[in-house]
Amino acid sequence: MKDQRSLSAKQRPAWRDKAMTWAGPALALVLGIGIAGPAALAATQPSESGGNVAVANSPTVTQDVNVTDAMLSDPGGANWTNSGHGYLNQRFSPLNEINADNVTKLVPVAIAQTGYTASFETTPVVVNGVMYITTPMVDSKQAVIAMDAATGREMWRYVYNDGLNHICCGPVNRGVVAAYGNVYFVTIDAHLVALDAKTGKVAWSQSVADPRIGYSETMAPQAFNGMVIIGSSGGEWATRGFIAAYNASNGQQVWRFDTTDPKSWAGDSWKYGGGGVWTTPAIDTQRGLVIFSVGNPNPDLNGRVREGDNLYTDSIVALNAKTGAFAWAYQEVPHDVWDYDAVSNVILFDTTDNGQTVPAAGEAGKTAWYYIVNRETGKLIRKSEPFDQQKNMFAQPTVAGVQSLPGANGGSEWSPPAYSPVTHFVYVLGMDQLMTFKTEATTHSIPGLIRLGSTFSNVPGGVQDGTLTAIDVNTGKIAWNQTLPQPMMGGALATAGNLVFSGEGDGWFDAFNATTGKLLWRFNLGAGVNAPPVAYEVNGHEYIAVASGGNFQMTYPLGDALAIFTLPQ
């Protein structure tokens, strides 16, 4: 590893709306309060705070920020228009100005602070030099912020006031989609909101589910064919999961698909069977399919009240994108009682099967296998070699408790992998957490109350580390694996510069050689880097951006920063 830099507490006193000269040729713009370095954060962990930051002298958006389906399908190098950089969800940038030979020169040009200190999981979206990010919910408020993608200067801010809500896994929001002159985002209290991309003014707001019984919304939406597509969160409550499409111009529901199939559930347990859709779906435009992963059944860890395979939980599912009609499904874990749900983004790519090139869809499972299915039929092509440790997996929980790997977080959690069409590797974030699973008495369905049905907990002194793994999609073999000191949660970015970027919970933001896995560069942002990075271009120069705000689930150091990097110019 050739280069490591950090923001220490001494380098970063508290600033507000001031600029500083970086120890190098770049200029870093810092908005809001400062972030402490890793040592200080360990001693004085900030609590969730914020939600009411004033903005003054904001420039207006003059760029053309109208995004078409063609731009959503292929954003090119300059833009990052939706969560996965295109309908394939590959998170691959064709830019190579920043590459394996010069990444050691990468420096920050802006550290923009939102004022919302909590789990920060947004994927920045960039359209012609304008960046859009979402914040977590703090003090019942969450925001969408437009900023200059090269400097971090804020252009507008919309603040949404959340009503009654239930959340299991942090007050998170994973970003917007830019489409048809608007940006679309979801809220913790289960609304879908359209904002004018130039002004931030509300175009419309639509309630999509009842938050009183446990529904919430956290995903970055997808847009296609004049529709906005979202899925439900809240699978830890006795709800019935769904994915639905809404008219992008007025918010009216176009179609809805419920993710629990009554034929594979005992009695009426399908009515409260979970099956949330946590992450942004992929779109196969050639076949007219929307393809996504479905989360855990409910109750998560007690299957006695829901006998059967519990379709379509823990599955990769494909629907007709225009009508919502069922096309096919592949279930990774029938009748799950370990919370081994399918939660990471589905990626579309081509692979080989019996010597033939076939269209495929892949999903990184909590089971520590990467599943690859034929996206015309849903049939399994291959499972990868395990990318994390497996021990006593699928042992039935008992009253005394059984220890298993992966733990309930995975394997791979919600973190979106990246795929490179250059290396044909998929890059997966993983978690090794030895856990004890114990059964409890059967719990009844009570609307509005969380229902897990059993317990899981980390084993004192047990393994607690993370991995970043490159998997060859044509063979399922592991090309390289980096073991890291903490469980990995956030996301990956692959670029044509032969690089893979990802962050760690202790604040490090890393760049690896995409072919070999060698760590080439890292920078410490103080708070946990538990969000997916992106690449884009402004005025002919490549930039890398990532949120640094920590993670509620893993108790990683919290913050509120959006960091922007580039090469010295």
Image (tube, rainbow, N blue to C red):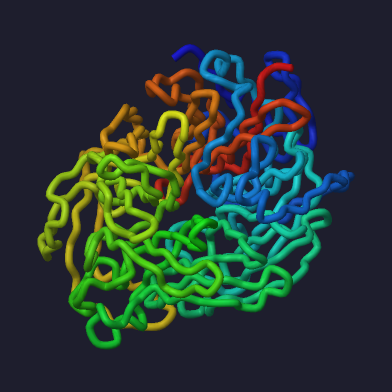
Q: Quadrant of the N terminus?
A: top left
Q: Is residue 5 left or right of residue 274?
A: right
Q: Residue furthest front?
A: 356
Viewer-closest of 211 and 475: 475
Picture layout, residue 450 above or below residue 504: below
Please give the count of numbered marks on the rendered protein.
0
Q: Quadrant of the C terminus?
A: top right
Viewer-closest of 76 and 502: 76
Q: Residue at x 68, y 15 (%)?
A: 23
Q: Is residue 441 left or right of residue 432?
A: left
Viewer-closest of 369 and 301: 369
Q: Residue at x 38, y 21 (%)?
A: 516
Q: Position of residue 52 (x, y in %)?
A: 72, 55
Q: Position of residue 504 (x, y in %)?
A: 45, 34
Q: Residue furthest bottom?
A: 267
Picture layout, residue 219 above or below residue 93: below
Q: Residue at x 31, y 28 (%)?
A: 479
Q: Is residue 405 left or right of residue 465?
A: left
Q: Is residue 234 left or right of residue 192?
A: left
Q: Position of residue 203 (x, y in %)?
A: 77, 68
Q: Can the viewer see residue 161 in this picture?
A: no
Q: Can the viewer see residue 559 in this picture?
A: yes
Q: Position of residue 56 (x, y in %)?
A: 86, 47
Picture layout, residue 183 above or below residue 389: below
Viewer-closest of 440 and 339: 339
Q: Residue at x 46, y 40 (%)?
A: 418
